[in-house]
Image (tube, helix red, strand yellow):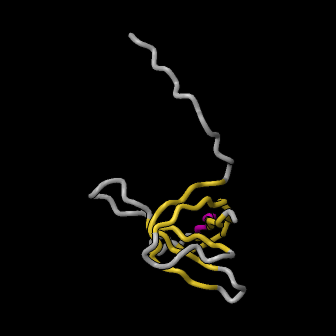
Amino acid sequence: MATAEATPIKHVAQAGVVKIAGKIENVTSFNNGGFATQVMLPAEDQYSMPAHVEIRSHKRLGSKGEEIDVLCAISGWPRKWSKVDKETGEQRSGTSINMVLRAVE
């Protein structure tokens, strides 16, 4: 039985940084001068739904319909929630994570 060889790593990515490539669906400007750019990523195959992400930036990344390729820093924060279970009346609580992509500028 042959032993599989590991593929050498040519570039080690910085932790917390991702490359986003896709088509701009919408751009919104903030009062402080920043922008929120909604990007549709390519689907895995013809039967999959494409993912959508929002990238926040100081500068405009492009216009609707343009293809972009940008490095983003991942940030986020926990958000606590609570609700009452309608069936049992029991109080339930948990934590969700709000994740934000910020363009590396």
In the current view of this chain or complex, which residue is farthest to the left? 47
4 shown above or below 90: above
Q: Which residue appears at 40% of the width and 60% of the height?
A: 42
Residue 36 locus on image (x, y percent): 59, 77
Q: Is residue 102 visible?
A: yes
Residue 18 locus on image (x, y percent): 60, 54
Q: Which residue appears at 60% of the width and 65% of the height?
A: 96
Q: Which residue appears at 44% of the width and 72% of the height?
A: 87
Q: Is residue 51 magenta?
A: no
Q: Is residue 94 visible?
A: no
Residue 82 locus on image (x, y percent): 61, 72
> Predominant secondary structure in magenta?
strand
Foreground residue, 74 or 5? 5
Q: Is residue 93 magenta?
A: yes
Residue 23 locus on image (x, y percent): 44, 68
Q: Which residue appears at 68% of the width and 47% of the height?
A: 14
Residues in magenta, as a range = 92-97
User: Seen in the image, is 21 located left or right of residue 103?
Assistant: left
**Which quadrant of the rendered structure holds the C terminus?**
bottom right
42 shown above or below 23: above
Foreground residue, 71 or 48? 71
